Image (cartoon, helix red, strand yellow):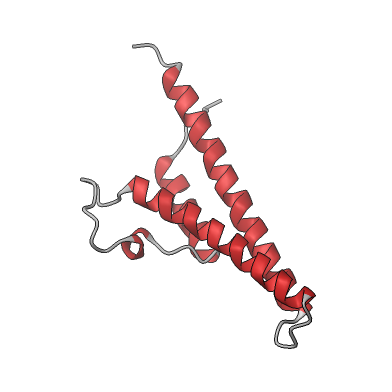
Amino acid sequence: MNNSIDTNSLLTQLRVMARDAGIPSSEEVSPGAKPAPDGIDFSKVLENSVKQVNNRSTEVKALRESFEAGNPNVELADVMIAAQKARISFEAMTQVRNKMVAAYKEIMSMPL
């Protein structure tokens, strides 16, 4: 049984999930940032992703408060959809964190 991780496949899947979740690609993250040698500045991508998840959470809170206050322009369906998007974004971020921790542990357990 092969337990190796196909990094290209994993990156492709993460990019598709990020695009579906509304998280901009690395080219949209910070155009003025100096890219890493391979063209992707991982820290900026990670930072932007965390900010996007936080923004979604803040947006849901504001929508909920508006709906509870009786704002006629905010419908329950909008609140529920925004809440589900925020939940999915958070779960995706959690899965990425779990994969990163697992990869770190695997690297640390490798003999020198």
Report x, y in % for residue 91.
63, 50
- Left or right of 98: which side holds 7? left
Name the residue nearer the viewer: 15 or 2.
Answer: 15
Seen in the picture, residue 61 relative to 33 is either above or below; the reply is below
Q: Is residue 60 left or right of residue 52?
A: right
Residue drawn at point x = 35 percent, y = 61 percent: 29
Which residue lies most toward the bottom here?
Answer: 72
* Residue at image coords 64%, 57%: 88
Q: What's the residue at 75%, 77% (across, down)?
A: 67
Q: Nearer the viewer, residue 83 or 109?
A: 83
Foreground residue, 56 or 3? Answer: 56
Residue 19 location (% of width, % of height): 48, 64
Residue farthest toward the top in the current orientation of the protein: 111
| Residue at the image position 58 percent from the left and 43 percent from the top | 95
Query: How far across and how far down the image is residue 75, in percent?
Result: 75, 81
Q: Position of residue 96 (x, y in %)?
A: 53, 44
Quarter holding the C terminus is top left
Report the number of numbered marks.
Answer: 0
Residue 111 figure quarter? top left
Quadrant of image for the N terminus: top right
Is 45 rendered above or below residue 100?
below
Q: Quick one: which residue is furthest to the front in this view?
A: 69
